Image (spheres, rainbow, N blue to C red):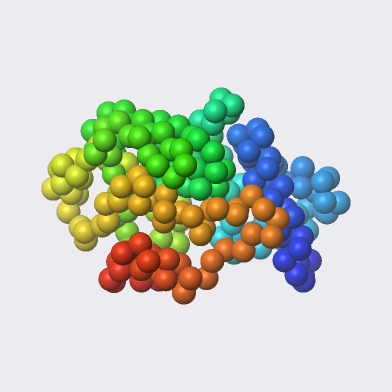
Amino acid sequence: MLIRSTDLGQQVRKYVLDHFLEFSVPPVVEQIMKRFRLDRGQAFEVFQWLEAARHVRLVPGTQRILMAFPFSAVATPFVVTRRNRRWYFANCAWDSVAFHAMLNEEIRIGSQCHHCAESISITLANGRATASPRETRVYLSLPAAKWWDDILNTCSNHMVFFRGTSHIDDWRDANPGPEGAALTIEQTHALSVPLYRDRLKLEYVRPSKDELVAHFAALGLTGPFWNL
């Protein structure tokens, strides 16, 4: 086993995020091999460790990075732009908002309503949001305990933007199922803070389930939907 401590894993994790931040795409495994003087098997082992620790998601059956939260390696409906004009695809509506928590700087989000496909634009600065339409909501249709059952499906289909609660109601009429959670942009940002605030730091540690549930409760998000 190559990784006997988290040191190498954390170094590679930060390298992956820094690469995304600079180039808007992930590094390939060959870059990891060169940068950290690993053979292919060792580099893939580190990728597997990162995936098991919920830092990245690989393209199934490959050694290629698909997600390094909040970054997406493929086109999505969630485009995040910084003031320096660099832009990125986020994995989901939540991840697009989480860029603000991670970067601690103003960002702009361009997206579409999951129901009608009309445009949504959001500016986040100092933890406050300006959205058009003002009624824009982040809708989480799966309960928290199911998010990681299939994170690709969760991000692609169950963490999305709607132009308001009426659009959520119309979409639910056409797609009946368990009731989800509709959050404001600022609620979503607050939800993101413990998971994303220090993500670019080498010493970042993902919060435990208990810590996350306590954070949810502090935001008034309680009940079976929010149980991990």
- Residue furthest to the top: 85
Apparent side of residue 6 relative to residue 149 in the rendered image (left or right)? right
* 43 in relation to 23, above or below: below
Apparent side of residue 49 relative to residue 33 in the rendered image (left or right)? left
Q: Residue at x 26, y 32 (%)?
A: 133
Position of residue 184 measured from the top left corner of the image (x, y, whole percent) = 31, 47
Residue 86 is drawn in which quadrant? top right
Q: Residue at x 63, y 39 (%)?
A: 20
Using the image as rendered, state which of residue 215 and residue 152 is in the foreground.
215
- Asked if one can make out residue 79 in the rendered structure from this viewpoint, the answer is no
Q: Residue at x 50, y 35 (%)?
A: 106
Q: Residue at x 69, y 50 (%)?
A: 14
Position of residue 174 measured from the top left corner of the image (x, y, whole percent) = 16, 45
Position of residue 70 measured from the top left corner of the image (x, y, whole percent) = 52, 47
- Residue furthest to the right: 37
Apparent side of residue 223 relative to residue 145 in the rendered image (left or right)? left
Residue 227 is drawn in which quadrant? bottom left
* 14 in relation to 46, above or below: above
* 219 in relation to 116, above or below: below
Q: Quadrant of the N terminus?
A: bottom right
